[in-house]
Image (tube, rainbow, N blue to C red):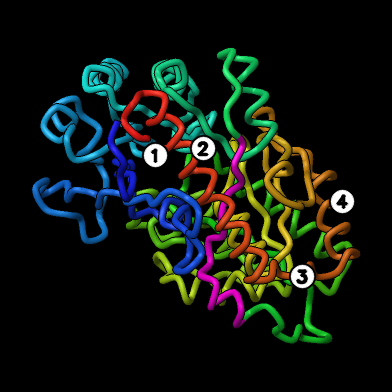
Amino acid sequence: MQPRDSIRVASVPSGHVYIRHLDPLPGTAQGIPGVVRLPDPDPDSPDNPATGKWWPPVMLSAEWVDANAESFDVFHIHFGFDALDPRDLQEVVTALRRHGKPLIYTVHDLRNPHHESPAAHDAHLDVLIPGADALITLTEGAAAEIERRWGRRPHVIAHPHVVELDTMADYAHRPRATGAPYRVGVHVKSLRASMEPLPVIRALLEVAREDGGMVVQVNGHCDVLQPDGARYDAELAQFLDREAGSAELELHVHDFLPDDELWKYLAGLDLSVLPYRFGTHSGWLEACRDLGTAVAAPDCGFYADQGPVFSYSHSEDGLDAESLKAAVRAARNAGPPRPLEPRVRAEQRAGIASRHAELYAGLLQRSGVLQ
């Protein structure tokens, strides 16, 4: 066994905001093992670190593991294996075993939001969940589902903040506009298979007209709502164009927003509605919590385990419009939630970093690598 100043983690990926916020803030890492995550290799030039693009992940190959086994201590998979054949993913697991490298897998998704059918993602999970030395997930509900399906109980470690702490502080005590309409947002970004926004928007317009004093703000990406877009949805786009002249619907069409604009937009909503018919967890939900925006979330995933939400019934069998209306009214009656204090999120992040570092160290101690 050899003492080591830090644990080197091959993280797939490392540049994603969730993974970046698994690291402790400066000055808060006393008493826990140091963790250094390898930078994402550039997919177009694998010998160089990525400068923003990390997909497809270069590390997810047996060849990369064989060639780089001396550069890392543990291998931690989060995202990015969607396009891999399960046999190739199994080869990665086998290569890690061959080199004695522990594998950690964080189960973010039990159902891939990009896939119409669960079959492909299930095949990946059937490799990773039995093959990992340790499992993490974000909620107790997801942990129970994993234990039911695979007989393994993951560590439950909450999602860290998404919005940077100094930005959170800027929004923490902002004054709320008085006398303005109650603003309910639906974000129609490049449509995933899990999204079904049209019936959700129809129901929101109904409650806006029934109750008054409410505006439904739809932000949609150009590729979905413009005829020359790669994912153009004619039915949705034409409906929104027809309704955009009404007092209840406000339509904004744009490309991806930079973070500062995205946070300003989210903070300007009273309620953000997640229009999903299947799913597991949500980073969007966490960003809303950071900014003090209430969330209405479907009951098809584990969103209510992840954080306080106003639940409504939406699944692959369809939307219960009355339950969505009830969720909107409950959120409106409850008033604005307080944004999470940056201090609270900083303390949570320190705990999350500590639990990850201790998990890595424990795996290495059991394998005899660390003292």
Disc 1 designates what residue?
Answer: 79
- Secondary structure beneath disc 2? loop
Within the image, what quadrant is residue 280 found in? Answer: top right
Disc 3 designates what residue?
Answer: 338
**In front: label 1 or label 4:** 1
Residue 230, given in percent of the width and then of the height, sits at 33, 50
Residue 247, given in percent of the width and then of the height, sits at 72, 75
Find the magenta span and give its range. Answer: 156-170
Distance in Å between CA atoms under marks 1 and 2: 8 Å
Q: Residues within 10 Å of mark 2 (few under 14, many from 20)?
A: some
348 and 31: which one is in front?
A: 31
**In front: label 4 or label 3:** 3
**Which of marks 3 and 4 precedes in the sequence?**
4
Q: Amino acid at mark 2?
A: His
Q: Residue at x 49, y 41 (%)?
A: 358
In the rendered image of this protein, does residue 66 appear above or below residue 169?
above
Disc 4 designates what residue?
Answer: 326
